[in-house]
Image (spheres, rainbow, N blue to C red):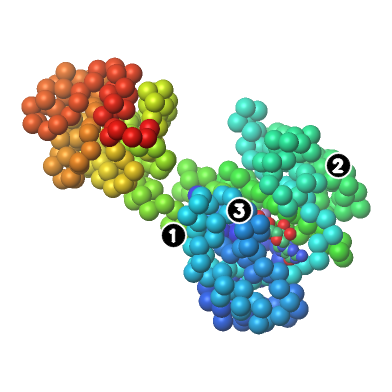
Amino acid sequence: MKIHEYQAKALLASFGLPVPRGTAATTPSEARAAAEALGTNRYVVKAQIHAGGRGKAGGVKVVASLDAVEASAAALLGRSLVTAQTGPEGTVVRRLLVEEGLDIAREFYCGIVIDRAREAPVVMASTEGGVEIEKVAAEKPEAILRELVDPSLGLRPYQARRIAFALGLKEQQRAVEKLLLGLYRAFLQLDASLVEINPLILTADGRLILLDAKLTLDDNALDRHPELPALRDVGEESPLEVEASKYNLNYIKLDGRVGCMVNGAGLAMATMDLIKLAGSSPANFLDVGGGANVERITNAFRILTSDKNVEAVLINIFGGIVRCDRVADGVIEAMKLVQVKVPIVVRLEGTNAPEARQKLEASGLHFTVASTLAEAAARVVAALPAGRN
Ligand code: GDP
Ligand code: MN
């Protein structure tokens, strides 16, 4: 689950981490009042959207008067902001964070993620702060320091100090140590999958401050944090993905033409690969999971076909936990409830596959039934209306 910068900063501040003073606002007059309450003469007005790259896209304004705060807020609110991370349609700004402006002496990057290959959290830091870290990783990988954390010991103070020295923060080593240990504690206690501070700054007067903060929480651990789900902003999520999550369907919209309905993430990945191999590309990733009953299949179908980019559908189900004939019932039922105008190719394999095939054939509905995955992929691609792939 992604959350906004202002929420991430509030959570991190509750772990004693130093963030700029600031308040969220949803109207220009609220923004002005928030700025006034800061009692300073430099302000930063920041668009709150679930995407980075706002600075370059004009979503972060550093201004010097209350009038300018109000004007910046009016210019940002309600507008769609297109950043390197939003996609071409951009994201509408509905909230701002108004903060005190700080004098930046140096900018750093620091972040914590799980290194899956090493099965441990890794703390990353770099002097290349304030720029896209992906770019640094690609072009100058040696500029990113990595400290692997032994999960049973946690981040050790010497590791934090090693980072401090490498960043040229010898004088601030105690502050760096406190900051990184605090960040690690927050990462662990919040069950985060990512915490990223870009930039972490050293101010002109020698303070270390988290100027930006990105925090991603592990959905699977939200049960352990009853206060965190309230931070979800469904307005930032794709409407079809929000709809899918209501039914516990794992759905991710993609940009191809073939709608896919599959059970199991591995099979879903393989299906997407075979569609590519057959010359087209998937319109979505949809894993209906093990308990694929009529209701789930109907909802999956509805979500899948309400995507106007879907020009043909491939249903590829392996009957294991779920029986193929039950899936066939679901598909037939769903076809009665949802108007489907695009070609459908079905491949059901596993438990009760012959019964499923009989049901589909007896339904009088138009399906192409395929027996192998490669055949199913070839057929669904062939069924696409002529034109682009
Ligand atoms: P992002 O572009 O979405 O990652 O947004 P950031 O929060 O990282 O802000 C982008 C840039 O705005 C930062 O790298 C800074 O250069 C600038 N910025 C943000 N806050 C301040 C501030 O208080 N003072 C100054 N001088 N610059 C700031
Ligand atoms: Mn940033």
Q: Is residue 70 above or below residue 185?
A: below
Label for residue 52? 3
Q: Is residue 181 above or below residue 207?
A: above
Q: Is residue 86 above or below residue 255?
A: below
As helix, strand or loop, the secondary structure at mark 2 comes to helix
Query: What residue would you read off at disc 2?
Result: 166
Q: Amino acid at mark 3?
A: Gly
Q: Residue at x 88, y 47 (%)?
A: 168
**Residue 157 at x, y percent in the picture:** 81, 43
**Residue 209 at x, y percent in the picture:** 76, 59
Q: Are marks 1 and 3 in contact (CB under 8 Å)?
A: no
Q: Residue at x 69, y 44 (%)?
A: 133
Q: Is mark 2 within 8 Å of ligand 1?
A: no
* Viewer-closest of 185 and 99: 99
Mark whose residue sits in front, 1 or 3: 3
Q: Is mark 3 within 8 Å of ligand 1?
A: yes
Q: Residues within 10 Å of mark 2 (few under 14, many from 20)?
A: some
Q: Residue at x 58, y 43 (%)?
A: 193
Query: What residue would you read off at disc 1?
Result: 235
Cα separation, mark 3 vs mark 2, equals 26 Å
